[in-house]
Image (cartoon, rainbow, N blue to C red):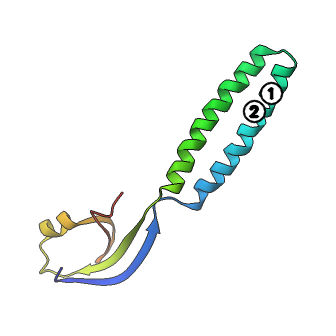
């Protein structure tokens, strides 16, 4: 688009490394409850075993959700740009999502890349 000067271009991911931390954390917690569940059923404590089973299933569902979002992460390109007065902002807003503005410097993402 004429009238736009690109200052910086950065590729970013929709998912961060902290997601992996939480996946590992809840995997360890889930395995702990799984071991408690097995121990409770061996000792014939059905109520405790059933409670651990429910918690283990909830953690497994959360892990499945976290793992699937981590695996299916996508990348997008973020641009820092300068816009001169010749740019029509209506046309600009149809094509770009403005993420941030610092004075005359805009941080934008192409709308078809935005997740």
Instruction: Count numbered badges in the picture.
Output: 2
| Horizontal side of residue 41 vs 10, given as left or right | right
Q: Which residue is mark 2?
A: 34
Looking at the picture, how far across and down is residue 110, in whole percent?
28, 68
Residue drawn at (28%, 77%) of the image = 104
Q: Quadrant of residue 105?
A: bottom left
* Mark linked to residue 82: none
Looking at the picture, how far across and down is residue 35, in whole percent?
80, 33
Q: Quadrant of the C terminus?
A: bottom left
Residue drawn at (67%, 29%) of the image = 55
Marks 1/2 in contact by CB < 8 Å: the verdict is yes
Looking at the picture, how far across and down is residue 86, in whole percent?
11, 81
Looking at the picture, how far across and down is residue 69, in whole percent?
50, 51
| Horizontal side of residue 40 vs 26, given as left or right | right
* Mark linked to residue 38: 1
Give whichever of 74, 107 is nearer the camera.
74
* Spatial CA span between label 1 and label 2: 6 Å
| Horizontal side of residue 103 vs 18, given as left or right | left
Q: Quadrant of residue 102?
A: bottom left
Residue drawn at (69%, 47%) of the image = 25
């Amino acid at each position: 688009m004429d009238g736009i000067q690109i200052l910086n271009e950065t590729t970013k991911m929709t998912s961060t490394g902290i997601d992996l931390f939480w996946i590992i954390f809840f995997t360890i917690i889930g395995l702990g409850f799984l071991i408690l569940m097995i121990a409770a059923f061996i000792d014939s404590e059905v109520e405790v075993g059933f409670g651990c089973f429910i918690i283990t299933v909830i953690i497994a569902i959360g892990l499945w959700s976290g793992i699937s979002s981590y695996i299916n992460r996508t990348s997008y390109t973020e641009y820092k740009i300068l816009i001169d007065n010749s740019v029509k902002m209506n046309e600009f807003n149809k094509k770009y999502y403005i993420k941030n503005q610092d004075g005359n410097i805009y941080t934008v993402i192409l709308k078809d890349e935005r997740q």
